[in-house]
């Protein structure tokens, strides 16, 4: 159930992304700014149709391939549903919730029926054309049920909304607290939806009725903005203050690595109000700090309410929205002053708790050396480091056995698991087995950072799980020739070339904790401007990931290099990538590895920034970037390894 709700929360983000555009148009066209009526009404065109936008966006999010047929089905489903229940009871108003119902239904029906084959005389209506038909049929039935039962439910929802709105300080503070507390499990989007788009109503001078805190604030409701104002001090000032505290308390030798990371995400939070990168950097390392953060958010909401401050946003509580809506806010300068106070509070509280309780935050994690054992102690020495069946056995034991794993998947560098009981995981043992890191993503989701050999380990683990085989291996196994360790020689600056034309970056600038904190190893990164990726070294193709977004290479000197194109690109399932090499193929510097549709990656992945990681350097070897700016593919002397 939790994973399903997380999926819903993720799907909500696509239609929510439309809000900044609507807010910008509504504000720029308003009579107190540029007084351009058609621009103002263009923004209203989005706000007036949020329900169908949500239906389309959620249908895309739930469909397996983001198909336009799913989007069309979501829109059709909403129109049928709304027309049906309004015909039964004209007073019913499900608002955006009707779009959510239609979107979820359409997404699931698309996945089930998108390839259905009908009898020949109906063949035209088969496949994807069938999905809007079956969606509208089901929505007719749903509209009849909703038309009969929704009246009392609507009354209950209105009563709950009125309690939040009329509960004053307690209601506002409770919302702020739970808004942050639900982020780790991804349910805050569902909670926000009720406050932002449903609770409360306001009738403007033209007789138009607006629901939800965001719409009411933008339309001039004098009672709206209290449920939004308190977020500005947290996102613009408080969490950046926490970043400063985490930087100053980091271990001395880790400050350089985490400084750029914390600085960039702090600036992002201040400018845009996007705070998840900060929150995820410490919520699982130190849950106590996250609870404190949720409490402080509630206190900020209560403080703004008591000071009678009203402000609002169309996307999030960052500087952009703060400035954009400054003219229609109430006491915005006092809100900025409150923000400075909360920056100080966050800094002092976080600094004190981190130092006093020795809490783990970025730059203060336990060093891997503290967990290392000999291979013999870990049960791997006899069979060799690359005996993946043996490793699979020990990883399964450390994870609580196959019966504790609900699902197992992997990307280019990490195992992605859904666990039944997280408390049965032996995190220390997992690190002893060679994992570079363990990330607990909520109560059930777990990521184990393995490296470029993750595919072989995951395959071996799946094989044992499918065969229900937990017999301990006791015989040495032959190490596959393709994966035998080789002795390593020095890799000079002339031996390494730029893998793609683009802006060269330090590995610490990668907006992904696994890479920026060098869990996978040291290296560099590229923000590509072209889509042709070439081999950075002479060597052999070690592995090509099924999702085509990453290639592993072993250089002739023995170094293993991961060329990882973009971030979160494993979710694209190979779309936008075309592999040009085969596993076991010998390559030279400049040989084409893969072609990438950068426009597609920019649209559907979180970033095109591509880490190039040396996964088996010794602890003393460090990578230093020697060039800056845009560098052509094939250029030498781009980095130095010492």
Image (cartoon, rainbow, N blue to C red):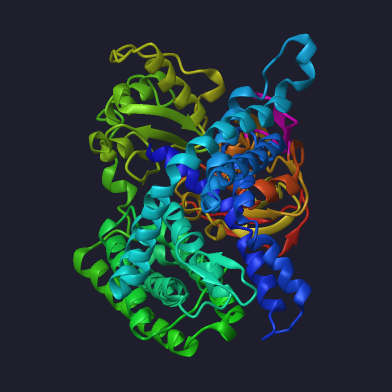
In this view, 505 is above or below 325: above
| Lateral position of residue 108 relative to residue 244, left or right | right
Classified by dominant secondary structure, the portion drawn in magenta counts as loop
Residue 278 visible in this rendered orientation of the protein? yes
Image quarter where the N terminus lies is top left
Q: Position of residue 370 (x, y in %)?
A: 27, 47
Q: Which residue lies furthest to the left in this view?
A: 356
Q: Position of residue 291 (x, y in %)?
A: 28, 61
Residue located 65% across and 43% down the image:
79
Asked whether residue 596 is drawn in magenta, I would say no
* Number of disc labels: 0
Q: Which of 419 and 642 is in front in this view?
A: 419
Query: Splitting the image into 4 quarters, where does residue 122 fall?
Result: top right
In this view, 116 is above or below 254: above
| Lateral position of residue 25 relative to residue 430, left or right | right
Q: Nearer the viewer, residue 321 or 141?
A: 141
Q: Position of residue 336 (x, y in %)?
A: 46, 85
Task: Find the magenta span and give its range.
Answer: 573-588
Residue located 57% across and 68% down the image:
314
Asked whether residue 575 is drawn in magenta, I would say yes
Q: Nearer the viewer, residue 514 or 489?
A: 514
In this view, 352 is above or below 64: below
Q: Position of residue 417 (x, y in %)?
A: 40, 33
Residue 488 visible in this rendered orientation of the protein? no
């Amino acid at each position: 159930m939790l994973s399903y709700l997380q999926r819903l929360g993720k799907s909500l983000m696509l239609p929510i992304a439309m809000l900044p555009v609507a807010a910008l148009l509504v504000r720029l066209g308003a009579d107190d700014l540029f007084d351009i009526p058609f621009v103002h009404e263009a923004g209203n065109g989005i706000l007036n149709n949020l329900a169908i936008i949500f239906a389309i966006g959620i249908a895309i999010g739930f469909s397996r391939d983001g198909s336009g047929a799913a989007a069309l089905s979501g829109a059709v489903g909403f129109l049928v549903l709304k027309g049906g229940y309004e015909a039964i009871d004209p007073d019913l108003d499900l608002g955006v919730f009707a779009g959510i119902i239609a979107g979820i239904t359409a997404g699931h029906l698309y996945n089930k029926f998108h390839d259905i084959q009908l009898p020949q005389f109906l063949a035209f209506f088969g496949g994807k054309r069938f999905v809007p038909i079956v969606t509208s049929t089901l929505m007719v039935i749903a509209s009849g049920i909703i038309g009969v039962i929704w009246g009392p439910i609507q009354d209950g929802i209105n009563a709950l909304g009125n309690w939040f709105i009329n509960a004053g300080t307690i209601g506002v503070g409770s919302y702020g607290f739970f808004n942050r507390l639900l982020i780790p499990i991804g349910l805050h989007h569902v909670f926000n939806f009720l406050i932002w788009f449903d609770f409360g109503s306001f009738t403007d001078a033209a007789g138009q009725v607006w629901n939800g805190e965001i719409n009411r604030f933008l339309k001039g409701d004098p009672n709206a903005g209290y449920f939004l104002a308190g977020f500005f001090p947290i996102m613009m000032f408080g969490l950046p203050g926490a970043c400063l505290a985490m930087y100053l308390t980091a271990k001395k030798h880790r400050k350089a690595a985490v400084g750029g990371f914390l600085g960039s995400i702090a600036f992002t939070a201040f400018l845009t109000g996007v705070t998840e990168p900060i929150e995820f950097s410490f919520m699982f390392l130190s849950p106590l700090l996250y609870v404190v953060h949720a409490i402080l958010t509630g206190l900020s909401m209560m403080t703004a309410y008591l000071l009678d401050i009203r402000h609002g946003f169309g996307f999030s509580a960052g500087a952009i929205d703060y400035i954009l809506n400054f003219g229609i806010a109430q006491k915005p300068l006092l809100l900025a002053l409150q923000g400075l106070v909360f920056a100080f509070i966050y800094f002092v509280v976080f600094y004190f708790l981190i130092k006093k309780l020795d809490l783990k935050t970025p730059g203060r994690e336990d060093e891997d050396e503290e967990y290392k054992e000999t291979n013999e102690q870990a049960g791997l020495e006899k069979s060799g480091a690359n005996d993946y069946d043996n490793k699979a056995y020990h990883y399964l034991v450390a994870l609580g056995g196959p019966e504790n794993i609900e699902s197992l998947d992997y990307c280019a560098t990490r195992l992605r698991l859904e666990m039944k009981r997280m408390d049965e995981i032996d995190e220390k043992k997992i690190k002893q087995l060679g994992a570079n890191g363990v990330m607990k993503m909520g109560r059930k989701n777990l990521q184990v950072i393995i490296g470029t050999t993750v595919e072989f380990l995951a395959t071996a683990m799946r094989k044992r799980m499918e065969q229900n085989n937990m017999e301990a291996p006791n015989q040495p196994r032959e190490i596959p020739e393709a994966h035998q360790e080789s002795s390593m020689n020095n890799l000079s600056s002339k031996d390494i070339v730029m893998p793609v034309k683009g802006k060269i970056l330090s590995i610490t600038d990668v907006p992904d904790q696994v890479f920026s904190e060098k869990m996978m190893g040291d290296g560099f990164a590229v923000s590509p401007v072209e889509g042709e990726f070439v081999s950075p070294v002479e060597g052999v193709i070690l592995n090509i990931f099924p999702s085509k977004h990453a290639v592993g290479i072993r250089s002739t000197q023995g170094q293993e290099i991961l060329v990882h194109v973009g971030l979160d690109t494993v979710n694209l399932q190979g779309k936008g990538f075309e592999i040009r090499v085969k596993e076991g193929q010998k390559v030279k510097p400049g040989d084409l590895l893969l072609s990438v549709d950068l426009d597609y990656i920019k649209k559907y992945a979180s970033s095109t920034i591509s880490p190039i990681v040396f996964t088996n350097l010794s602890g003393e070897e460090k990578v230093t970037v020697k060039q800056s700016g845009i560098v052509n593919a094939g250029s030498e002397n781009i980095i130095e390894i010492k």
